[in-house]
């Protein structure tokens, strides 16, 4: 938008719950836009800020703003490209369309412009790199939390096998505080494909497992490190653990249980450039 | 129960949704038994195992078992003292009483027998000790996760100021995988009271804060260490941070955000006897 245009001047007021422009926002709790041409829902100011600054891979298609919150959203409206429509509705319309009480004040429909390939992502990594590899993680909360940790510790990318859930599910985006829109990722192929590609690119791969042979605190540093994580219940496939280096987070034998997202935070902190 | 009594022989079958013996299990999603004479609901086998082995502070008042799961619960029924009634119901009765579809197969009403005082807990700690101190953490998920981490890294106890939520809320117990029934805790007094008591007992206190002056990886070891954590949004009170040693989890300046439970896992791992 042009400098000098006041935020209020670019919004399109809508009062009709049935307005077709609101279709992408309808019943968003019941369904998920993922899978529909890479579209997704972003909620709240913080996530929207990430979306609007992630132009390499993502773009906003439209914004939906509560009319009584407009004045607090000037920054977001300024960041938003002028061709993106900004719809403005009363709370009752927002809630009726979304299918629940929306208290965040702002929603956006985003779209993934480009889905990098595994090979493409790896080819672009620097000489020193930290990569999180997820195998079979299908819980949206866990995927979101792991991305949040990956962003906090500046992992260079997240590689997911195709049995992981999509990180652009609404809940995964929200739990990640937008990190799934920030940390580059690929979700492609089998875990064997990913491991082969990492080995090709000279990564040291450590599989996290409660039965790992080394403590994460004793793993020697390497320029390119990949941390492989599986589901909490089943863990990583046994055959995989047999042929990889394995590391454990040292802990009590009596209560040997960590949430996988917490485990990712501990391991990523340990291997990050900041530790 | 006597050896030789088969688990099925001690269960009391109930088919009537209105049976008064089921009253403590009624509508457990809507209300919480906490505050009613220290009673709480434990869900699932794993949590029940912890409850039945935490006789110092807790006891089971009754168990409620799905009839088609009875055969998988022999271990729990054997651990359960003979005076504790075991009610057995069909799925339809379980769901109607609880107010939602219970898929875990077993519930228990537990009771806190003794609530240790802050002073009593501290007086019983060994010469080398690690204590987690929570200030104003009112989210049940976060409290549950922090207890889970405290158990995994064998913190000696958790001290909570009175603005924290009760760790015996159903959801906190469930998220903690029973750790709130395992790790001794006190929830008493103000944060200033707790800090004074810790100093009296020669604890080195480190307040975790994104603006902490030292990295957690550079904090010198001490025999008795206390880690103080506040809420994610507001953090610890500024006045408190000014008079305490502060430590930060070193991370990205661009995405300076960790869930408080994840932060507790990283810091407890770093300070645990296992690292």
Image (cartoon, coloured by chain):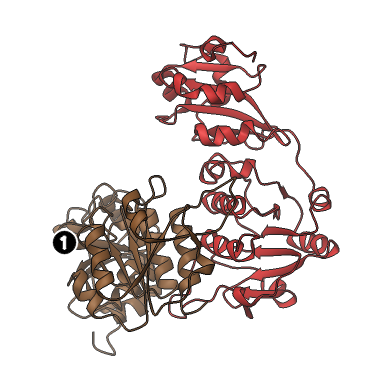
Chain colours: A red, B brown
Specify whether B158 is left or right of A147: left
Residue furthest toward the front? B243
**Image quarter (top left, top right, bottom left or bottom right) of the C terminus of chain A:** bottom right
Coordinates of residue B233 in the picture (x, y in percent): 41, 45
User: Label 1: few (<14), some or many (≥20) within 10 Å?
Assistant: few
The relative height of residue A113 versus residue A145 in the rendered view (above or below) is above
The relative height of residue B210 versus residue A93 in the rendered view (above or below) is below
Specify whether B26 is left or right of B225: left
Mark 1: which secondary structure?
helix
* Towards the viewer: B67 or B177: B177
The answer, for residue A150, to whether it is visible in the render is yes
* Total labels drawn: 1
Specify whether B12 is left or right of A94: left
Tell me the residue at 64%/19% (across/down): A84
Which residue does the numbered mark 1 point to in the structure image? Answer: B21
* Towards the viewer: A99 or B78: A99
The relative height of residue A16 versus residue A36 in the rendered view (above or below) is above
Coordinates of residue A25 in the picture (x, y in percent): 54, 26
Instruction: Name which quarter of the figure residue A6 lies in.
Output: top right
């Amino acid at each position: 938008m042009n400098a000098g245009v006041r935020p209020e001047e670019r919004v399109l007021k809508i009062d009709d719950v049935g307005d077709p422009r609101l279709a992408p926002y309808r019943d968003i709790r019941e369904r998920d836009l993922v899978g529909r041409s890479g579209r997704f829902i972003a909620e709240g100011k913080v996530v929207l800020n990430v979306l609007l600054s992630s132009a390499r891979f993502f773009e906003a298609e439209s914004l939906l703003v509560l009319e009584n919150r407009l004045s607090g959203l000037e920054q977001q409206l300024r960041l938003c490209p002028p061709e993106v429509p900004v719809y403005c509705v009363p709370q009752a319309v927002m809630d009726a369309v979304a299918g629940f009480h929306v208290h965040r004040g702002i929603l956006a429909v985003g779209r993934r412009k480009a889905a990098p390939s595994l090979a493409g992502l790896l080819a672009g990594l620097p000489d020193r790199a930290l990569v999180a590899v997820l195998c079979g993680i299908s819980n949206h909360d866990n995927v979101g939390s792991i991305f949040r940790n990956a962003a906090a510790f500046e992992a260079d990318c997240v590689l997911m096998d195709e049995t992981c859930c999509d990180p652009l599910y609404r809940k995964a985006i929200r739990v990640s505080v937008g990190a799934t829109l920030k940390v580059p990722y690929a979700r492609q192929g089998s875990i064997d494909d990913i491991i082969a590609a990492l080995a090709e690119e000279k990564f040291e791969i450590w599989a996290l497992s409660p039965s790992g042979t080394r403590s994460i605190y004793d793993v020697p540093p390497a320029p390119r490190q990949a941390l492989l994580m599986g589901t909490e219940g089943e863990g990583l496939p046994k055959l995989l653990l047999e042929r990889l280096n394995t590391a454990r987070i040292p802990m009590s034998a009596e209560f040997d249980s960590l949430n996988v997202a917490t485990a990712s935070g501990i391991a990523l902190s340990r291997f990050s450039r900041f530790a």
